[in-house]
């Protein structure tokens, strides 16, 4: 009976797994922010298209110079909102790529230790089988020697 397998770097592996979990959470949060940003951008583009196409609420009355100036200011404000949303989307994309890279590195670091543990576990299994085989051979040899002596 050999000693049970014990991976000496188990605590380090647990820390790496925890780091990977945190990286997954940060990636998910970044992905969620990007999805919200896409919705904001689509809404800004929709409002701008509506304003540019001349969709006016009924009952505004006759168009005057002041109403045209106000409408142009409104369209410019909506254009500014769209540009801001586009800039935020670029930032979300950059953040998402950064988080994806961090997640890949964290996963790789954990996988290295997983493979090391698997390799050491297999080496331990093979060594245990070898020792057990030697013991069985020794027992068989002793039994044979006793039979021959008897």
Image (spheres, rainbow, N blue to C red):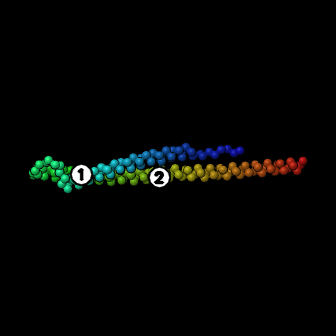
Residue 80: in sight, yes or no? Answer: no
Instruction: Count residues near mark 2 (Cα–Cα under 10 Å), then give few for <14, some for 14-19, many for 20+.
Output: some
Measured as percent of width and height from the top left, residue 73 is found at 17, 51
Foreground of the two, 51 or 137 = 51
Q: Residue at coordinates 70% horizontally, 51% vertically from top-left?
A: 129
Check residue 2 in the rendering and tell me which mark sits there, or answer none.
Answer: none
Q: Secondary structure at mark 1?
A: helix
Residue 79 percent across, percent down from the top left = 22, 53
Give residue 47's mark: 1
Question: Residue 1 location, x and y as percent?
Answer: 71, 44
Residue found 22% across the figure and 53% down from its top: 50
Q: Residues within 10 Å of mark 1 (few under 14, many from 20)?
A: some
Residue at (16%, 51%) from the top-left corner?
71
x, y percent for residue 149: 89, 49
In the image as oriented, which residue stretches furthest toward the front? 58
Residue 100 appearing in the image: yes
- First in sequence: mark 1 or mark 2? 1
Left or right: 143 with respect to 23? right
Say which residue label 2 marks.
105
State the separation of the CA atoms marked 1 and 2. Answer: 41 Å
Please indicate whether residue 101 sits to the left or right of residue 145 in the image.
left
């Amino acid at each position: 009976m050999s000693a049970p397998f014990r991976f000496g770097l188990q605590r380090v592996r647990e820390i790496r797994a925890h780091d990977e979990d945190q990286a997954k959470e940060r990636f998910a949060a970044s992905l969620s922010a990007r999805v919200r940003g896409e919705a904001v951008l689509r809404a800004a583009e929709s409002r701008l298209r509506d304003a540019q196409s001349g969709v006016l609420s009924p009952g505004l009355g006759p168009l005057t110079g002041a109403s045209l100036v106000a409408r142009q200011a409104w369209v410019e404000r909506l254009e500014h909102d769209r540009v801001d949303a586009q800039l935020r989307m670029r930032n979300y994309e950059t953040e998402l790529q950064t988080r994806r890279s961090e997640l890949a590195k964290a996963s790789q670091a954990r996988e290295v230790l997983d493979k090391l543990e698997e390799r050491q576990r297999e080496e331990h299994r093979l060594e245990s089988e070898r020792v057990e085989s030697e013991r069985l051979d020794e027992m068989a040899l002793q039994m044979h020697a006793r039979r021959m002596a008897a």
